Amino acid sequence: MKLNELRDNPGASKKAKRVARGPGSGKGKTAGRGIKGQKSRSGVAINGYEGGQMPLYQRLPKRGFNKPNRKSFAVVNLGLIQKFVDAKKIDGTAPITEDALVASGLVRRKLDGIRVLAKGEVSAKLDIHVTGASKSAIEAVEKAGGSLTVTTAAAAE
């Protein structure tokens, strides 16, 4: 086989339909848009419009409430913190702060703070300072002989 003999499998590639390129193309003149009217013209945005009928998004019942000022926390599992300490990416002897977690690459960004959850095992004696933590996470760290301090969000900012 030579380079000039290389071909794609039959039917693997398909040429794009070129609209408005003459009557022989099968999509000439009006380019498949029909004759006249709003949709035949350029610059049209009528998504969700149903010809005067009440649109679907307005017919459906609305439920719930989205709190405009809700807090969004970056979530970290204890097992991952232990893994990073074992890999020497986080210094287990020094207090583990939110900045240390971001610097190690365990958390991308702090958002409104970092919340620690109890998934995974923790064996090292860790001193963790974060904005939030689950009760089971606090128990797990204290069981391993460490301490998990939850600071207020105002102090973290």
Image (cartoon, rainbow, N blue to C red):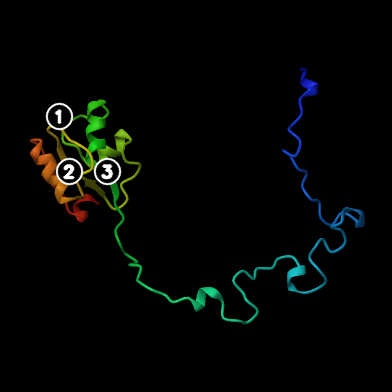
Q: What amino acid type is highlighted by mark number 2?
A: His
Mark seen at residue 74: none
- Label 3 neighbour load within 10 Å: few <14, some 14-19, many 20+: some
Total numbered badges shown on the rendered structure: 3
Query: Which mark sits nearer the N-terminus, 2 or 1?
Result: 1
| Residue highlighted by disc 2 | 129
Q: CA distance from mark 2 to mark 3?
A: 13 Å
Q: Residue furthest top?
A: 1
Question: Between residues 60 and 112, which one lies in front from this camera angle?
Answer: 60
Which mark is nearer the camera, 2 or 3?
3
Q: CA distance from mark 3 to mark 1?
A: 19 Å
- Label 1 neighbour load within 10 Å: few <14, some 14-19, many 20+: few
Q: Does residue 90 appear in the picture of this structure? A: no
| SS for dot 1 | loop
Q: Which quarter of the figure has residue 83? A: top left
Q: Quadrant of the N terminus?
A: top right
Query: Which mark sits nearer the N-terminus, 3 or 1?
Result: 3
- Compared with 71, 56 (above or below) is below
- Residue visible at 81% across and 55% down in the picture: 19
Q: What amino acid type is highlighted by mark number 1?
A: Thr
- Label 2 neighbour load within 10 Å: few <14, some 14-19, many 20+: many
| Residue highlighted by disc 3 | 76
Q: Which quarter of the figure has residue 29? A: bottom right
| SS for dot 3 | strand
Mark seen at residue 93: 1
- Compared with 34, 75 (above or below) is above
Query: Which mark sits nearer the N-terminus, 2 or 3?
Result: 3
- Compared with 73, 141 (above or below) is above
Q: Is residue 155 left or right of residue 7?
A: left
Which mark is nearer the camera, 3 or 1?
3
Q: Does residue 145 appear in the picture of this structure? A: yes
